[in-house]
Each structure stands twice: as C-alpha cells, then as structure tokens.
Image (cartoon, rainbow, N blue to C red):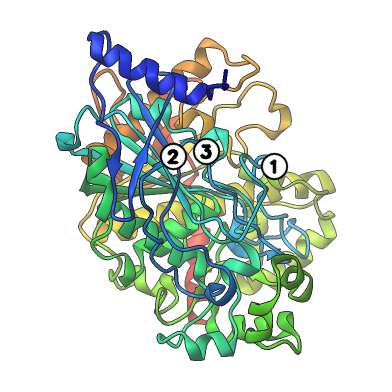
Amino acid sequence: MKPVHINKVLCILSFALILTGTVSAAIPEPVRLDSGSVSCISANDPGVQVFKGIPFAAPPVGDLRWRAPQPAAHWEGVRKADQFGPNCTAGGGAGGRGGAGKGKGPGGGDKGPAPAKAAAPAGPAPSEDCLYVNVWTPAKAASDRLAVMVWTYGGAFTGGSGAEPRYDGEALAKKGIIVVTYNYRLGLFGFLAHPELTKESGHNASGNYGMMDLAAVLRWVQKNIAAFGGDPRKVTIAGESAGAILVSSMVGSPEGKGLFQRAIAQSGAWMGLSIGKMRTLEQAEEAGKRAAGTHSIAELRAMSTQEVAQAVTGVQAGVVVDGWMVPEDQSLTFLKGKQNDVDVLIGSNQDEGTFFGGPPASAEATKNRARQTYADLADDFLKLYPANTDAEAGASSLMRSRDETGWHQRTWAQLTTKRGKKAYLFYFTHVPPGNGARGATHTAELPYMFNNPPANGSWTDVDHKVADMMSSYWVNFIATSDPNGKGLPEWQAYGAKNDSQAMVFGDTVQFGPQIELPRLAFFDKYYAVVQKK
C-alpha cells in the first residue's frame, strides 16, 4: 500500500467535512490561475486553505540573473501547492544599511549595528530558483472579495523567507483576510548594480531586483487573487525591517501605482533605521564594479550559483536610487507629497537596539562620534543622550536607536497626513517571555502581530491577549483602513494634537505617549541638516 501524504489526508478530510456540512464551504479546487491550476493543502483549521510554492515569475537563473522578473511558464494539469518553494540564496552579498539600517548614531560602533538576522531557514535549501508565493485563504467562494495582505519579510536583504513559521498566515486568515507571503531575491542576486546591467536594462537602471520582485508579486496578486476569494482593490502591503523598507520604497515608487491601497511598516522606512540619504545609482555601480572585479556580466551569468557567489563579494544589499523603481531619494518624494496615495499603519519597538548586539562604544568614543555625526548639534545630542560614563554611553546608544527609528515612523505619519491620507502609529513595549534584558527588541512584535504563539508554550494569558488584540487591529486596518473595532481600545489617527502619541502595545494595550517630543524635535533638526548636504 502506497503511503498517503498527511497534507493530502487533511485536504480530503476538509472536503469530506464540507460535504457533510460540519464546516463552512471552501474555494472549489482546483484553483485556476493565469499560469495553470493549483490544488490546496488544509491548514490546522479546516476553514482555511493553504496554497504553497506557486511560481509568480520565471526562475531568475542563467540569462535571467539580474534582470526584471519574467512571467512564470504555464503548466499543464493541476500543480500540487503543498510545499514551500526554496528560499532565495544571498550568495556573497554583505548586509548593508538597508536591512536593519546602518547605525550612524554615537555608541553604535564604526560600522553600526549588525544587520538583522532572519529566523532559521524553512523548506528546501536556498536557491536562485526561489520566486514563489504562498496563500492562506478563509474564503468560502471566489466571489467573497476578501481583503488581502502581502507580507514582505525582514533579514537585512540577505536572509529571510516567506516560508518562515513565524509568518504562517493561518491565524490572520481565520480573522477574515487573505494572507500572501512570497520570496524576493537577496544579497548579490537581488541588489547588484553594475554599469553593464544599467546599460542593458531598458530603463537605465540596475540594482533593485528584490524590489522588482515585490512589484511582480503585486501584479500577480492583481491577476490571480480573485480566484482565491480576494479583492484586488483591497490590497495591503506589509513588512518588517528590510521588509518595511521595501514597503516604504514601493509606497514612494511610481511602479507601485494602483497595485495596493494600504501599507503597514514595522521598524523600518526608506532611510532604514537611521537618518541618512539613500545610495545613488552611481555609488551602487562603483561598488558593484569592485565586487565583480574583472568579470563581465556575461561571464558571471555563465557561472553556477556557487561560482558567482565566490566571484562576487562585498555587495551592499539594499534599495538604491536607480532612476526607475526609485526615481529620486525618497525623502524628497515624501516631502513633495509624490508618494502613492495610501493610508498607513506604522511604528517601532521600545528596545530596537538590543537586537543588534555587540559591546557599546566607550564614553570617549561616543562623544567623538557625536561630534563627527552631529557637528553643531552635538551638544544638543549629548544633553539628550549623555555619555559621561561607559555605562551611560551604552544606555544612550540604545535610546538613540529607539528614538531615531521611532522618529522615522512618526515622520512618515506626518507626511502621510499632509498628503490627505490617514496614518496610525504604534509603539510596541511588551516584553516577550524569556527576552530578559533584550526587552521589546527589534522583531519582538512579529509573533503577536501574526498571533502565532511559540511552540514552547511560554506565553501567558497577557501574551495571548496582546496577540489577539494586535492581530485584530491589523486585520481591521487591512480590511477597512481603520484598525478600530468592537471591543478594542480606541486607536486615534495621527495628527498634530497627538504628535508624540501612539497605540502602545504593552502589558496593557492603550493609546498614549511614546517618544518624548524633545527627542523627536532633535531629530527633526538633524534631518533638516542632512537634507541640505
């Protein structure tokens, strides 16, 4: 007797339950897409169907390496969407300021904090053939027209995957939305800029291949999500860290126009996690030439994945001003109000900086760095972030990381409301069990936002309550552009009257103060200086 795969058993069981009327109906299978038909697997909840590993673009290998994503090939018959596709390999790329933002503030060390690391890989071994999408849907029929969240993972643009267990979409889907995760190209395969690539592109641009993948999956959603019971006119792009940077970049990009209606960004925006200008195409091209050495692009495309990873090293992964996907430094785009016309839900965590590790700089080094970075504003900085002892310098470094990241999100909220759209700010302060001194660190909010408790059963009643409320706010915003709902404390939209307030997700969830106004005002001054350079 042949063994039967457990996922097939679950799908059969789900279908049987549907026939007997003991569970709500589900999308009829197979689901017909623009490239072919797919069949589901069942989630733990039989009311949610899961489709894994659907190609949304052709494998970007061989001659398609470092090109805009091309359409996926059509397949005959029914494709079993029962396994995640491979994670994207980063090759020899090095994490840059894009992933978690390169810490420029005093106390962060000369190189800034280490890039944000992704969780342990899930699914098949990493590969260049990695452009796959996953869908969780609770729809009962294709006509349901449910709202959709497209999730972009973090990982410093050198790691991460749409298959990570912490991004499992079942719990959010059970609350009435469709969840889409996907993979985008990483490291040298996703962000290599080079004069040869610029010349051949047809757009006089190169380097933003990972961002092009996001645009491609959004076009895939527009064409296909209705077959899963989704509404292509109710799409929210969402992401954390590097994913939040890609989200903000797409909000600011003309290539995103009409592909989504709302955006969620957690701990990241177009400048990363610290204030600075985006890299230009010329800067990225020069770095790409150094990384590629004497090899031509044709030679590199003829190499295997392993060979090119050895030949090309030191690529700074992250979004650049390429003149096409990103026409200009997006600080200018947002200041001019030229970004896409969308409502946003954005915010950061209380202890962002503890995630990045490493010993803090000494008091003397911190003061020197303050003078180098802030120049005439250095004294003002050191009043807010004193460094009279090494211990004080370390604590101030963490505060600066927290406040500069929060300032960026609040600035995005300001510029959104100026555009005439709504912005909702959050501030995550709840300390997960076992986090200790790391506190509410970078990424700490993810299991609460997805309502995915850890497998070790460490969550308390408070944790479960925070997760239930947080996920409900997110689902409400994705569905209606307003996070508020029955039984939830009121979340006020951002405005001048509540400039330093946000929805605070602590042991108690309530709207209240976050970063103090004098700290926000300091970074306003510094930002103005940076923009004049």
Q: Which mark is residue 83?
A: 3
Determine crowd level at label 1: few under 14, some 14-19, many 20+ residues with C-alpha closer than 10 A: many
State the residue at coordinates (53%, 25%): 5
Q: Secondary structure at mark 3?
A: loop
Q: Is residue 326 above or below residue 173?
A: below
* Residue 397 visible (yes or no): yes
The mark nearer the N terminus, 1 or 2, is 2
Residue for badge 1: 354
Residue 403 position, x and y percent, is 56, 49
Residue 192 in picture, x, y percent from top left:
61, 75
| Above/below status of 519 relative to 288 | above
Whether residue 78 sits left or right of residue 370 in the image: it is left
- Asked whether 226 or 237 is in front, the reply is 226
Q: Which residue is painted at 68% across and 86% down in the image?
A: 289
* Mark pair 1, 2: CA separation: 39 Å
Instruction: Out of 65 and 443, give the one closest to the viewer.
Output: 65
Q: Whole-Å distance between the Cαs marked 1 and 3?
A: 35 Å
Q: Amino acid at mark 1?
A: Thr
How crowded pointer 2 is (Cα within 10 Å; few <14, some 14-19, many 20+) is rated as: many
- Circle 2 — which element? loop
Q: CA distance from mark 2 to mark 3?
A: 6 Å
From the viewer's perspective, is residue 428 above or below residue 335? Answer: above
Q: Give the numbered dot on residue 81.
A: 2
